[in-house]
Amino acid sequence: VKEHDLSTPFYSSPMVADGKVWLFSNSGTVSIFSSSNFNKITSFNTGEKTFATPAFSDNMMVVRADKTLYCVKKTDK
């Protein structure tokens, strides 16, 4: 078992997809961890409050922020 103190509140549930744990904080910070060892991969801010849990399907992630609906699609390189 591992843990990380992200020092921010969360309403959305953590989601596991594509071998990663996705966490969306209330302030809009997205933290992505490896699901195998829970090491932090990256984080970024959406710029909006985010209270919704993201949904994953068909290589896409959809999440509703305060004023925007984000849809991100994974593409082959």
Image (tube, grey):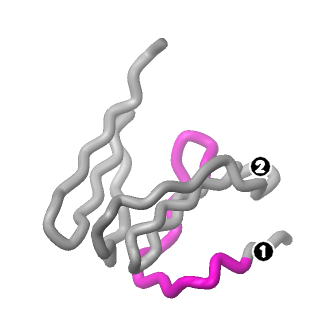
- From what the image shows, is residue 41 above or below residue 74? below
Q: Are marks 2 and 1 in contact (CB under 8 Å)?
A: no
Q: Which residues are magenta?
A: 5-20
Residue at point 32%, 77% (across, down): 51
- From what the image shows, is residue 44 above or below residue 49? above
| Residue 63: percent from left, percent from top | 29, 59
Which residue is most to the left? 67
The residue beneath circle 2 is 36
Nearer the camera: disc 2 or disc 1: 1
From the viewer's perspective, tell me whether residue 47 is left or right of residue 4.
left
| Residue 58: percent from left, percent from top | 34, 34
From the viewer's perspective, tell me whether residue 16 is left or right of residue 75.
right
Amino acid type of the residue tagged 2 in the rendering: Ser
Amino acid type of the residue tagged 1 in the rendering: Glu
Point out the image quarter for the N terminus.
bottom right
Which residue is most to the top? 77
The residue beneath circle 1 is 3
Mark 2 secondary-structure assignment: loop
Residue at point 44%, 15% (across, down): 76
Residue at point 67%, 47% (across, down): 41
Q: Of helix, strand and loop, which mostly describes the magenta segment?
A: loop
Mark 2 closeness class: few <14, some 14–19, many ≥20 residues within 10 Å? few
